[in-house]
Image: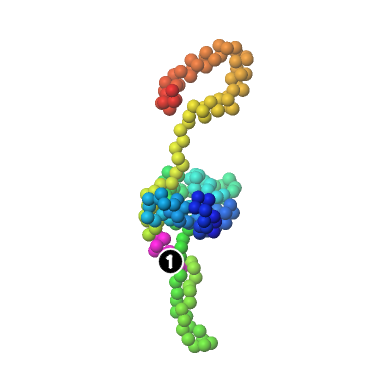
Amino acid sequence: MFVDPKLGKMGHTVYVGAFRKSNCFVRIYDKKLQVGPECAWPIWNRLEFQLNHDAADQYCNPTWNVDPETGEISNSWENLFSDPRRARFEDRSFPKTAFYYLKFLEPSYTEKYDEDFDFYYLGTIHKRYWPVCSWWTKFLNTSVGEKIGLPRHETGLQEIDDWLNEQVSGAIYLMSKVHGREYFDKLKQKGEPKFERNKKYQNLV
């Protein structure tokens, strides 16, 4: 439970995993309640997955190497090969990722006999044989096709200026000190055709 700063009252959140310790940490909460009256959706239950440590690396790096015998991810870089089963990053989807890390299971039972008391009863079978809850797979199926990926990042003038000042300014000072101010003129001459070929740079002007 937590006090929502916007609503000023207690809210309920279901947490799965240990924050900052688990490879996968899940939050489930009522987003409609958090947004308040301005929310246009009749129902808005939000499910968030936070991948940490090895899970985050495995998700973001499709070329991660694995042990050739066991298929397990290894910290060693000897005698390893790229895992062909790992999907490309742009092909990752929320349903597949969610189902890989989190499964809600339906308990299954079998008939057992107690010899001491001479009666039959229903006992649970081992969890490894429990089926996945149908409501969970149904929920994930509604999200099929929703791709997960990093937002496209466009470089702007400020970032180029920061890069020049932080990374290149020292080298430019050195070269101008050795070759004089004409070094800048030669640099501009070499840069002009490169600018003309770069559509992103032209759009910034």
Does residue 108 belong to the magenta stretch? Answer: no
> Toward which corner of the image does residue 193 lie, by quadrant?
top left
Q: Alpha-carbon neighbours of circle 1 within 10 Å: few (<14), some, or many (≥20)?
A: few
What sort of colour scheme is used for the picture? rainbow
Q: Please tell me which residue is depicted at 57% across the width and 56% down the height of the picture.
A: 18
Which region of the structure is painted magenta?
129-137
Q: Is residue 151 visible?
A: yes
Q: Quadrant of the C terminus?
A: top left
Q: Please tell me which residue is depicted at 48% across the width and 77% down the height of the picture.
A: 123
Q: Please tell me which residue is depicted at 53% across the width and 48% down the height of the picture.
A: 56
Does residue 131 belong to the magenta stretch? Answer: yes
Three-letter code for the amino acid on which mark 1 is drawn: Pro
SS label for mark 1: loop
Find residue 30 and report its horizontal and vertical position in percent: 45, 56
Q: Which residue is mark 1?
A: 131
Q: Nearer the viewer, residue 98 or 179?
A: 98
Q: Quadrant of the N terminus?
A: bottom right
Q: Is residue 67 visible?
A: no
> Toward which corner of the image does residue 134 lie, by quadrant?
bottom left
